[in-house]
Amino acid sequence: IKELVSNMINDPESVKAQTKGSQIMLGITIVDVTEEMSKQYSMPVGVYIREVAEFSAAERAGLMKGDIIVEFAGEAVTCADDLNAIKAKHSSGDVVSVKIDRNGKEVVLEIVLPQPTDVETQK
């Protein structure tokens, strides 16, 4: 966390590049499920949710630890970069569908995109 905050303060452009310009935080910690991992573990390619923050937009939508996001707002998600790029096209308050794989079953949830995360910084 210290590294992320330091980057936000000292190099905001790098953070913007990492999030593809999206400041909308869903409240999830994710890891990519690559093609290789998909074959090895019999799971779909997408974005695996490692953690869901309490009271976050993700939790309110019903996303859970272990879900794999395979589609967001009607667009395929194969990695975190895809998810961030799609989020960047939307605004807070938009309601978008999230297609997930939950224990081998396809589930579609609706998520209300939260306000962008504002971070006050002082050097």
Image (spheres, rainbow, N blue to C red):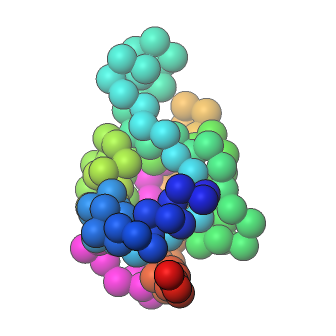
Query: What's the residue at 31%, 77% (across, down)?
Result: 90
Q: Nearer the viewer, residue 73 or 27?
A: 27
Numbered range of the magenta stretch: 87-100
What residue is rendered at 32% in x and 41% in y? Answer: 78
Where residue 53 appears, x then y in whole percent?
Answer: 69, 62
Q: Viewed as shown, does residue 17 lie left or right of 41?
A: left
Q: Residue 27: x, y in percent?
A: 59, 64
The outermost residue toward the top is 40
Q: Is residue 79 left or right of residue 112?
A: left
Image: 121 above or below 64: below
Q: State yes or no: residue 120 in magenta.
A: no
Q: Is residue 29 visible?
A: yes
Which quadrant of the view contains residue 55?
bottom right
The extreme right residue here reads 54
Residue occupying the far front of the picture? 123
Relative to 94, residue 107 above or below:
above
Taking depth in this image into account, of 108 and 118 the one nearest to the observer is: 118
Looking at the picture, how far across and down is residue 13, in whole percent?
A: 28, 69
Q: Nearer the viewer, residue 83 or 73?
A: 83
Q: List x then y, in percent, for residue 10.
A: 40, 70
Give the answer, above or below, for where 71 lies relative to 45.
Answer: below
- The image quadrant of residue 83 is bottom left
Residue drawn at x 43%, y 32% as measured from the top left: 33
Identify the residue at horizontal 61%, vertical 57% (top origin).
1
**Residue 68 appears in the figure:** no
